[in-house]
Image (cartoon, rainbow, N blue to C red):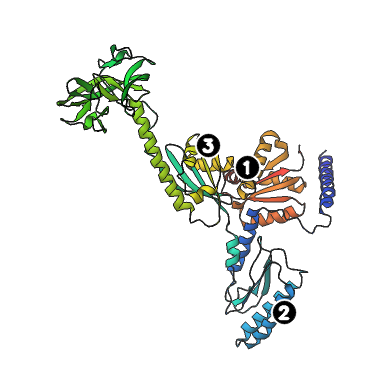
């Protein structure tokens, strides 16, 4: 029974391989090799290449570096290196002379393998790679860079010239990120798949609460639109009360929007021609056009009476003891209480909120100027936050004109802080369609969606994935960069046998971290298994 089962599995594997190879060969006719590595993988290749060459040191100036620019005639480079071979005859030290000449010869032979210069140019390196002092092991390395070389270089030195390749390891294009609401803001950058928070700040904007505390005693008299007087405790929502229009300098009638009770530890008894008892936070209008809280008033200050005329404070007494008081909001911003014009609670705090919000927006724009204006290769800026805060910020001309022109879009967000930066990038897929982070997130999200809906079309974990590779069932192999160079190289070489596409996933995104925590290896299959 076991033998039959083994025979069946072997036939199944063979049939799957045959089906795949027919499909694979059909798509590979007249193609030498499919370049299936993403930008992350390309940078990994360069990093690995550079790391190997950085470990080599020459005894003298005997290590050869050659950069061939895109579109340059290879014959000219070969002729130049042949001339350098002749020049190397003048090197006094015999061992150095021989190493340089042999290295140049290796470079020339390697160049003759190419019919023409690769599209992005070519970087070639040759020298003695032996770690033992008394042995010589001349090797040659070359790499076709992921972006065009625009310069030509030949140099002999104790180390290889690698600065240009190191620059290619960095992501050139950068996006500025701003997430904000009325309470906090975070600025950062998107570089390749990496999201980096750089600035976090909080505002001084009061919350939209009934904590204004502009309270009066419950028996305070309030004038209504019909000329009657009621206590503030008797007022109901939507009732009309007498108010004053400071712009038109005339009396009007305002609507009570809300009222609520507050407990206070003390209150102030303020005596003019009348007496009014208020909490220390309650705001009064002075005859000179200024405003003061009750706790800031002094004897002799001139308040405004029920006729909008000055009335002098004769005495202020602080009355200790817990007491219940009443706070109301009026749409006109003020009302008449005990024959004095007093401030509306909600209106004042709305103005305070708006003033603080404007100051907060200014601080955000100053931080954006500092972070983004001097940033090289800033491709664009993304702004996220709740409506209408982000629109108020963008439309309010707070951003520098140069930065405002770089804004690619505004996105609705549920979060701020560093989590908000990630949400902003996720919601900007339409604006970042060609960027590395979108490709990386896209392929990982595809895997997670299939894991939830079609689990028989994916695999994860070393044992499961290797089993699927052996059966030629893997379409895309997902490898975390955290696996290390040797492991990545092993899986890449193994994948080449079956034409499996490889995606090296960074740990800079949340999806990349999830892959790392799942063991660092997963696969999207060509067809359903089991």
Q: Is residue 196 visible?
A: no
Could you say whether the residue bearing mark 1 is in a helix, strand or loop?
loop
Name the residue carrying label 3: 413
Please, what secondary structure does the residue beneath circle 3 have? loop
- First of labels 3, 2 by sequence position: 2
Q: Residue 401: horizontal and vertical position, in percent?
A: 49, 49
Q: Give the Cα separation between the discs numbered 1 and 2.
A: 50 Å
Q: Quadrant of residue 410?
A: top right
Disc 2 is placed on an element classified as helix
Dot 3, crowdedness within 10 Å: few (<14), some or many (≥20)? many
On screen, 115 above or below 340? below
Q: Residue at x 72, y 50 (%)?
A: 501
Q: Report the residue marked by disc 2.
A: 79
- The answer for how far apart the CA atoms under marks 3 and 2 are is 61 Å
Work out whether mark 3 precedes mark 1 in sequence or the reverse, and give the earlier one.
3
Q: Quadrant of residue 152?
A: bottom right
Mark seen at residue 430: 1
Q: Please identify the quadrant where the N terminus is shown.
A: top right
Q: Position of residue 259 (x, y in %)?
A: 35, 19
Q: Which mark is residue 460?
A: none
Comparing 69 with 78, the one in front is: 69
Q: Are marks 1 and 2 in contact (CB under 8 Å)?
A: no
């Amino acid at each position: 029974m076991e033998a039959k089962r083994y025979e069946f599995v072997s036939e199944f594997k063979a049939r799957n391989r045959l089906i795949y190879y027919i499909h694979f060969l059909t798509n590979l006719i007249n193609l030498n090799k499919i370049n299936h590595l993403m930008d992350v993988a390309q940078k990994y290749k360069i990093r690995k290449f550079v790391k190997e060459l950085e470990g080599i040191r020459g005894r003298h100036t005997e290590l050869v570096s050659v950069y061939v620019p895109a579109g340059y005639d290879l014959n000219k480079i070969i002729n130049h290196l042949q001339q350098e071979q002749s020049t190397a005859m003048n090197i006094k030290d015999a061992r150095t002379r021989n190493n340089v000449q042999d290295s140049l010869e290796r470079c020339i032979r390697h160049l003759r393998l190419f019919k023409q210069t690769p599209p992005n140019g070519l970087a070639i390196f040759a020298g003695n790679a032996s770690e033992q002092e008394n042995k010589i092991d001349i090797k040659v390395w070359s790499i076709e860079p992921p972006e065009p070389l625009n310069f030509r270089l030949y140099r002999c030195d104790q180390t290889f010239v690698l600065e240009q390749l190191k620059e290619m390891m960095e992501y050139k294009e950068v996006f500025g990120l701003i997430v904000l609401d009325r309470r906090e803001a975070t600025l950062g950058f998107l570089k390749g798949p990496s999201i980096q928070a750089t600035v976090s700040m909080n505002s001084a904007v009061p919350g939209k609460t009934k904590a204004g505390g502009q309270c009066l005693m419950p028996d305070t008299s309030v004038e209504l639109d019909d000329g009657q007087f009621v206590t503030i405790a008797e007022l109901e929502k939507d009732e009309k009360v007498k108010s004053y229009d400071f712009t038109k300098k005339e009396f009007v009638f305002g609507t009570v929007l809300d009222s609520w009770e507050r407990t206070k530890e003390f209150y102030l008894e303020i005596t003019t021609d009348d007496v009014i008892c208020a909490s220390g936070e309650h705001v009064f209008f002075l005859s000179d056009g200024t405003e003061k809280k009750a706790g800031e008033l002094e004897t002799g200050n001139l308040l405004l009476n029920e006729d909008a005329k000055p009335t002098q404070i004769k005495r202020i007494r602080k009355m200790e003891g817990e007491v219940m008081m009443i706070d109301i909001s009026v749409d006109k911003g003020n009302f008449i209480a005990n024959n004095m014009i007093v401030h509306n609670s909600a209106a004042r705090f709305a103005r305070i909120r708006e003033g603080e919000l404007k100051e907060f927006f200014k601080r955000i724009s100053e931080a954006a100027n500092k972070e983004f204006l001097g940033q090289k290769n800033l491709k664009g800026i993304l702004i996220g936050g709740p409506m209408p805060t982000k629109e108020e910020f963008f439309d309010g001309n707070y951003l520098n004109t140069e930065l405002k022109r770089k804004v690619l879009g505004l996105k609705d967000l549920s979060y701020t802080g560093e989590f908000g930066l990630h949400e902003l990038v996720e919601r900007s897929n339409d604006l970042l369609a060609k960027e590395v982070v979108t490709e990386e997130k896209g392929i990982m999200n595809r895997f997670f969606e299939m894991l939830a809906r079609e689990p028989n079309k994916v695999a994860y974990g070393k044992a499961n994935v290797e089993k699927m590779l052996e059966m030629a069932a893997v379409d895309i192999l997902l490898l975390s960069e955290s696996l290390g160079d040797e492991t990545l190289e092993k899986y890449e070489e193994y994948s080449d046998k079956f034409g499996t596409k490889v995606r090296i996933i960074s740990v800079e995104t949340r999806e990349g971290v999830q892959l790392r925590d799942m063991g660092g290896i997963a696969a999207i299959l060509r067809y359903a298994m089991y």
